[in-house]
Amino acid sequence: MARHTAPMPRWWRPPSGTEPMYDETNTQNYYADQETAAQFEQKRFYGAFGRYLKAHDADFYANNPKVAYATCHTALELGAGSGRITEAMVSRQPHLQITATDRSEPMLAQLKQRPGLAQAGQRLIIRCTPAEALAHEPTSYDLVYFARLLMHIKDWQSFLQIAAGLSRNYLLFDFPPSASLGSWGRSVLDRSRHGAQHHDKYHTYNIAQVRQVLHEVGFELVWLYRPFVLPIPVHLKIGWPNGSLAIERAFKWFGLQRLLGAPAHMVARRITPPSPTP
Ligand SMILES: C[S@@+](CC[C@H](N)C(=O)[O-])C[C@H]1O[C@@H](n2cnc3c(N)ncnc32)[C@H](O)[C@@H]1O
């Protein structure tokens, strides 16, 4: 049923030329575009804070204190995109055999151009496939990870089940929690932009529900980390990592990171042995 939303005042509308938002129905088209793929990193990780964020995410995925990388032999990356995390994993965990997957050819074309990946040789397998298509593969990996992907997935419970089924031990991922300033701001923007039954948006998720699904698929949450109270676009605009970090420290002091921090980063470990493959 169409939802009626009152038109928003002109001053409230985002400037024209703003990057369109997307959801699962058009994410595929969005990332299938060559230009979008070519500009992905410079649009999302620009300036000094963008560089800080890249290093921050690389640490979370490729140098995480909760992960015993030495016990892992194989890793699978879902939605690897232009390879910013892949490159970190390849260089920081040189013993790992890594399979990087994504559904978009143009994004993987960017990944293949990364200087750090050109020398990976046999250690890196690149596959163009939707993550969901891996569900029936008998292969499993010691570590499965996906950065900035879950927000695009509507049926996130099934997705987590698939990702969990592929992992023998660790699952690392992030997503926008429904309790965060960014999510609230985004939902106001969504209403102002479309105000009708269909409007594009990121999916946001309730942390307790994600934890519950992890438990149902045989994993326990070993670390939940919520780094930024202010939405990332605000930090990018500030463009001064030390200033941003000082602001975030103040939020942390008041306990707000625990309540409103985003993205939610999770490290989960398998507690139930994987079911034998037929
Ligand atoms: C926001 S980008 C993140 C890229 C990369 N993980 C990073 O953090 O820089 C999302 C990526 O997920 C891919 N993607 C979206 N849905 C997917 C799916 N169902 N299966 C595989 N890849 C998917 C898109 O093509 C895109 O490259």
Image (cartoon, grey):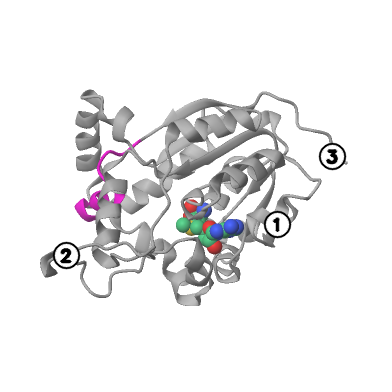
Which residue ends up furthest to the right in the rendered image? 278
Circles 1, 2 touching at the beta carbon (< 8 Å): no
Give the structural element (helix, strand or loop) at label 1: helix
CB at disc 1 and ligand 1 closer than 8 Å? yes
Q: Quadrant of the C terminus?
A: top right
Percent of width and height locating residue 90: 61, 48
In the image, residue 271 sits, relative to residue 17, either above or below, namely above
Q: Answer whether residue 183 is magenta in the image.
A: no
Q: Residues within 10 Å of mark 3 (few under 14, many from 20)?
A: few
Q: Is residue 19 left or right of residue 192?
A: right
Question: Disc 3 marks which residue?
Answer: 277
Q: Against 147, is 31 above or below?
A: below
Q: Which mark is residue 8?
A: 2
Residue behind mark 1? 133
Q: Earlier in the sequence, mark 3 or mark 1?
A: 1
Residue at image x 67%, y 61%?
Answer: 129
Percent position of residue 216, x then y: 62, 30
Circle on res. 219: none
Give, as a single range, the part of the protein colored magenta: 227-238
